Image (tube, rainbow, N blue to C red):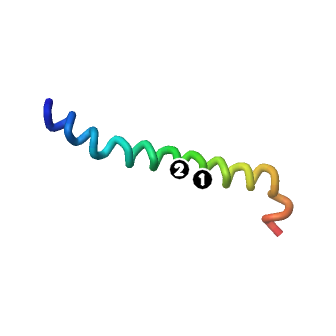
Amino acid sequence: SNYSWFVGDIFGAPLAIEGIVAFFLEATFISIMFFGWNRVSK
C-alpha cells in the first residue's frame, strides 16, 4: 500500500543504522570479553 511505501522510506534508514551500530557494539564487547578477559575481570 501507499502507507507502507511512505513509512518505509522514513523508518528504513534509522533501522538500518541502528542495526549496524548494535552489531558493532556487540562485536566490540564480545571481543573485549574474548581477548581481554584476564585484564578486564581483575
Left or right of 1? Residue 21 is: right
Where residue 40 appears, as percent x and y from the top left, is 79, 64
Furthest-right residue in this view: 38
Q: Which residue is mark 2?
A: 22
What kind of element bears circle 2? helix
Q: Is residue 23 above or below residue 5?
A: below
Depth check: give the residue in front, 38 or 1: 1
Relative to the observer, which residue lies in front, 38 or 5?
A: 5
Q: Residues within 10 Å of mark 2 (few under 14, many from 20)?
A: few
Residue type at mark 1? Leu
Q: At 15% across and 37% down in the image, what residue appears? A: 3
Mark 1 secondary-structure assignment: helix
Q: Amino acid at mark 2?
A: Ala
- Asked whether, in this view, residue 19 is left or right of residue 34, the answer is left
Q: Is residue 34 left or right of residue 1?
A: right
Residue furthest bottom as drawn? 42
The N terminus appears in which quarter of the rendering?
top left
Residue 32 found in image quarter: bottom right
In the figure, is residue 28 to the left or right of 2?
A: right
Q: Position of residue 5 (x, y in %)?
A: 21, 34
Q: Which residue is mark 1?
A: 25
Residue furthest to the left in view is 2
**Residue at left offset 60%, top offset 53%:** 25
- The residue under the point 52% across, 45% down is 20
Question: Few, some or many C-alpha atoms within 10 Å of disc 1 (few <14, some 14-19, many ≥20)?
Answer: few
Q: Position of residue 15 (x, y in %)?
A: 39, 45
| C-alpha separation, residue under disc 2 versus residue under disc 1 | 5 Å
* Residue 18 at x, y percent in the picture: 45, 49
Q: Are marks 2 and 1 in contact (CB under 8 Å)?
A: yes
In depth, the one of 9 and 37 nearer the eye is: 9
Q: In the rendered image, which quarter is residue 42 located in?
A: bottom right
Residue at coordinates 38% horizontally, 48% vertically from top-left?
A: 14
